[in-house]
Amino acid sequence: MTTPTPYYISRKQAHDFLAKFAKALEFPESNPLLSQVYGFGGVGKTTVLKQVKQTHELQADFAEVSFGLTPGIETPLKLMEKLYELLPKPTGLWQRDFLPKPDPFTSLYEQYQETVYKLKTEPVQGKSVDTEQQNTVKDWFELGTATLLATGAGYLGDHGTALSLGLDATVKAGGMLSDASQALKPTKERIQELLQQHPATKNDKQLQELMLEPIPKLTHAFAQGLIQKTQKHKRSIVLVLDTYEKASSDIDTWLWQYLLEDTPLKSYSVRILVAGRRSLLEKENWRKLQQDRDIIYEQRLDEFNKEQTKEYLQHIGITKSGDIQKIYKVTKGLPYYLDWIRNEKKKGIEIDFSLGNQKIITLLLQGLNQKQKQIVQLAACCRWFDRSLIKYLMQQQRIDFETGAYATINCFDWLIKCDFVEFAQGHYRLDDVARDIFRLSFCQEDKKQFRDTHELLATYFEKYADQEVSPDNPAPKKYENSDWRQYTAEFLYHALFARRDEGQRQFLSHLFASRYLNQIEVVMIPFAAVTAEAVVENYRLLPDQTERFLKSIALSFLFGWVMLADEPAKYEINHKNGTKPTKEDIEAALRPCFNQVDFLEDGLGKYAGLLYKSLRSHHNERMDLLKQAIEQADKILTDTHPEFSSSLFSNVSDYLYRLKEYEEALGSLEKALAIKDNLPKTWSNRSVLLINLERYEEAVTSCDKALVINDQYPEAWLNRSAALMILERYDEALGSYDKALEIKNNFPEIWINRGAVLMELERYDEALGSYDKALEIKNDFPEIWVNRGAALMKLHLHEEAIASYDQALNIKPHDPNILSGRGLSLSLLRRYDEALANLNEVVKVQPEYPLWWANQGIVLARAGRYQDSLASCEKALELQANDESGHYGKACYFALQNDVDLAIENLQQAINLNPRRCRREAKLNPDFDSIRDNVRFQALLQG
């Protein structure tokens, strides 16, 4: 055990903490995994951590980071990498040669990084990575895994995913297909598809799982690596997380949910030390974890009492009782201040305590003249500073930079020699406690001057951002520039303190724009800084309106920015253990952001805000908002970034498409094509709109244009097939689906739609094979089981058909489409009671749908309940006279009673309304067996 520092004074709180930790290190299985020391700034938390390290450095290896000071630990993955890097490496050849197994974390993390690089730089097909692949990779690996919010739907990339119409291929009881467009896919679905197709991942299921869930899998590897190190070296490992109040919410979630709850570290010689200003157990998730697992020990640290203060001061040579009393009265026993006194005494500086109960700020500034005090307060307003920034502030305040602080040293060089200034992450800054004190005193003394200083700083960083990228440049050029992003983040931080309403709006404008361009750090940095400082200041330094605003949007910023581009109905929040926030909480916190959209300046921020607000508005208001978005797009578009400019209109088109405003959506998409007409996605999306407008030939032509640009674009083949299928050009549709499968053979929707075409071609065995292929890829998709059941019905394999419908019902209980198909199959096996139970449930759920009444009528006729059967068929016709289902049901009803004339008459009426479907059904329907040889019946089937 090493000798402790001579200035360390034990307190009962610290003693208890040290003793408890020592016990946890010696007997890990029966003691807490995580130990936290907490208390407000300057109370001595870091000193206690140093004492732990000095006490146990011979028996344990320490990996220590400090949030806000240690660079490169912003996300869980980066934090794990840094902690691992800080642990001792094996030395000597023999250690490497005889290592029992490769390091689990290093090898898996290297594989992960290498794969991310390949996904970014190597195309799925062709010679270069397209924009959509780039956006998918960025969305998932830079946004999706940077945040641990678990959403059922993920979130949309704003540059859009190609729309694919296709067909949902839900074969109804009578064998009809309903067309429905495929919605824009969430990020998780897009990354799954990419992983299934990309050469680097498509043949490796384990690697796909890693890329889909990197946080939990790498955390397990991290824990296993730590355990392996302890077993190899026979030494404990201690992970130290200091200034934890500055850790991001993602880090916090990772720590409790993944590292503590989901790994076996507690049973091994690995301990975690946390120091921060607030208790972890203030948060519900942490309390729940402690209740369930009992793995946390925490100890609050308070100031020294009078005796401890006296002992400390005697240690450093201050022994006079009067001086000790005065010092205690001034410092209140806070270790930070006492340490400052020690440093001053060490430098031979005499401190005047004669003022007794003066504020500590006066004590800390003792010996400084008015100009020097002003310089310190100006520097305290900065999150960091360099020579250029201090020179600028001096000029603005009419302080001579060269001699304002001291006759022989300039203001910057004088400032960095102050004890409370530290160097971190490439910049100088005041340490946290000193900055808290000096900023608060500055604001209390002269609030106007405090705000004016932040205004000066906002102007400074805005100027540097403009110098980096001219304001005349389009938004993408700005947000792509890392220096511009850093300067803009600092600008926004200071604007929040200086500009009240304008500062809020500038912040919101960048929030919407940075979300749109996936560069969220521009607002994440200032928001995280302000909220971390608020733990100490309780927002006292912010303008009142800004304080209320930031409090109101806190949840939306921590969680809701991910879902800004999602309709509330389309995403789910699946928090572990059912903890908050709920979707309703997040959406409520987003409302203040949208309330200010109308007041934002013209530009990308307002454009994106209008889009996102439209997702949370009623139809008419949505239309108005989207028209305003088009007006903004007209102002933003630029010749230098045609793809970005085109996307402004194609994205509005996507939003209009969701509203089923197909004409307006097409108009917006035509604008996109006028700017850039060589994107296959845009032509393919155009075909979707044309199909919905029943302009099928034009839709085929639009797909053909997409395929001229890129014949390996599967969505274009899918949409082409959909249009051809509606045109009843089934052989051509099948050929297009086969082309799509050559590109994307592990995409279940293609196999489903191919099966639907084969059903139309009456190639039922092949259709069944296509559905089975789809099930090999995705067996929890109820539509596949439904369609498979329909194919089996056509093949007269009714028992198997019922089993297939049962599988569908297991996934989607009470679904009318599934129940109807199952009921028809049961009726052909003469299990009429079960069949009618299914059909009765269907008509209760959707009584306005004529097909269900017609199918009920058919089953009743098969059961011999002819009067009830006729009533059901008439009900179908009453609901919709021009729907073929009622006439077809009556044809079955009369055929089962051998009434040839009326059977043929009603079948003729059904065929007049839907020739192909009704002829195909009648060919195989056993209800017509009694009249199958009739010449008129055969003539009807032939057409």
Image: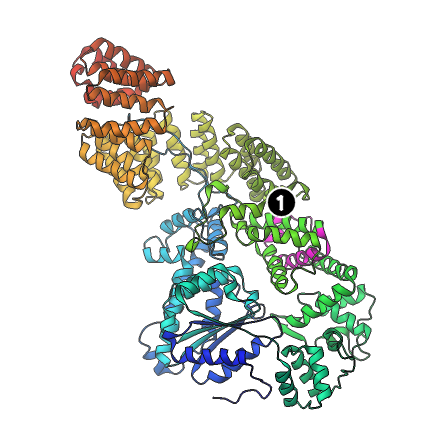
What's under tag 1, amino acid-wise? Leu
| Residue 817, visible in the rendered structure | yes
| Residue located farthest toward the top when viewing the structure as drawn | 901
Q: Is residue 29 left or right of residue 312?
A: left
Q: Is residue 142 left or right of residue 330?
A: left
Q: Is residue 468 above or below residue 749?
A: below
Q: Is residue 678 magenta?
A: no
Q: Position of residue 833 (x, y in %)?
A: 21, 28
Magenta range is 471-500
Name the residue: 54% across, 51% down: 518
Q: Position of residue 510 (x, y in %)?
A: 63, 50
The residue at which mark 1 appears reads as: 604
Q: Nearer the viewer, residue 636 or 835?
A: 835
Tell me which secondary structure the magenta stretch mostly adopts.
helix
Q: Is residue 278 above or below residue 20?
A: above
Q: Nearer the viewer, residue 398 or 721?
A: 398
Q: Position of residue 521 (x, y in %)?
A: 58, 56
Q: Is residue 474 magenta?
A: yes
| Residue 942, visible in the rendered structure | no
Query: Colour scheme in the image?
Result: rainbow
Q: Position of residue 7 (x, y in %)?
A: 60, 86
Q: Is residue 330 left or right of residue 734?
A: right
Q: Nearer the viewer, residue 483 or 354?
A: 354
Q: Secondary structure at mark 1?
A: helix
Residue 859: which quarter of the image?
top left
**10 Å neighbourhood of mark 1: few (<14), some, or many (≥20)?**
many
